[in-house]
Amino acid sequence: MDAIVEKLQEELNCATAIKVPFLEKIPLIGTDGISESIVVTWILMAVLILFAFIMTRNLRVNNISKRQAVIELFVTKTTSIVEGMVGEDGKRYAAYLTTILIYVVVANLSGIFGFKAPTKDLNITIALALMSIVLIEYAGIHKKGFSGWRRSFMEPVPIILPINILEVFIRPLSLCMRLFGNILGAFVIMELLKMIVPVFIPAVFSIYFDIFDGAIQAYVFVFLTSLFIKEAVEVE
């Protein structure tokens, strides 16, 4: 059990990957470097951008290549899934949500390739949740106007105003802790399996926790964000 605790502490420890001395002097930063999770995120972003560049070169309208057919199918299917979740009024946010879905899936799967998954860092999941909650509130303001958005906090009855305001802060907390907790929980289960059963069984479970569960958690994160956006743009 002590070994699991040590490994868990190691996973939770946001090690500094790049030393940047002047950061320490900036107010509210409180660190002298850039954490490993941020560096891995940069690497994943670079890989995704490079992949997108390669896959979208020399696109044609007629006589398209197999490469173009595959990428068009992927984009169409993924976007349609997200648009189905966010609804007709929220389609304008589908591109952002699709991007977040792809990033979180890739981030969750990065552990297979020897990286520390960025979603095991609470700072990353908090950042994702804050981005989502800003988008949710923006969607409400864009659809209803500032006055309508403000009045929505007093619906259906004014007495629940404090609860609706509190919900604004609860939603990002729920999003970030759900993603962080599930990814970290999968790590703990895998470490327990490695300790008490032969090698073969952890390898089988690894297929679920490292691949299937990572994709599910990405889907759940985007689904909940889409649901909140759908509620925000809903006009009574």
Image (spheres, rainbow, N blue to C red):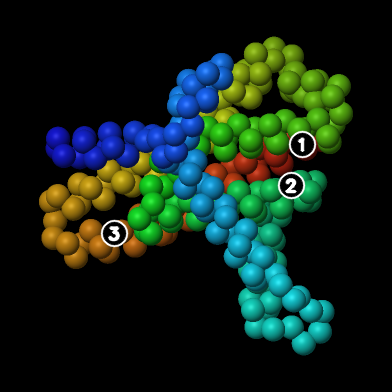
* Residue occupied by mark 1: 139
Q: Please tell me which of labels 2 and 3 falls first in the chain.
A: 2
* Residue 46 in picture, x, y percent from top left: 57, 55
Q: Please tell me which of labels 1 and 3 falls first in the chain.
A: 1
For residue 68, what is the image quadrant?
A: bottom right
Q: Is residue 23 above or below residue 230?
A: above
Q: Quadrant of the N terminus?
A: top left
* Residue 229 in picture, x, y percent from top left: 70, 39
**Closest to the observer, 156 or 219:** 219
Pointer 1: residues within 10 angstroms few (<14), some, or many (20+)?
Answer: many
* Residue 158 in picture, x, y percent from top left: 74, 14
Q: Which mark is residue 222?
A: none
**Label 1 with label 2: CB-CB less than 8 Å:** yes
Q: Which mark is residue 93?
A: 2
Q: What residue is drawn where x is 16% and y is 39%?
A: 3
Pointer 3: residues within 10 angstroms few (<14), some, or many (20+)?
Answer: some
Q: Is residue 17 left or right of residue 188?
A: right
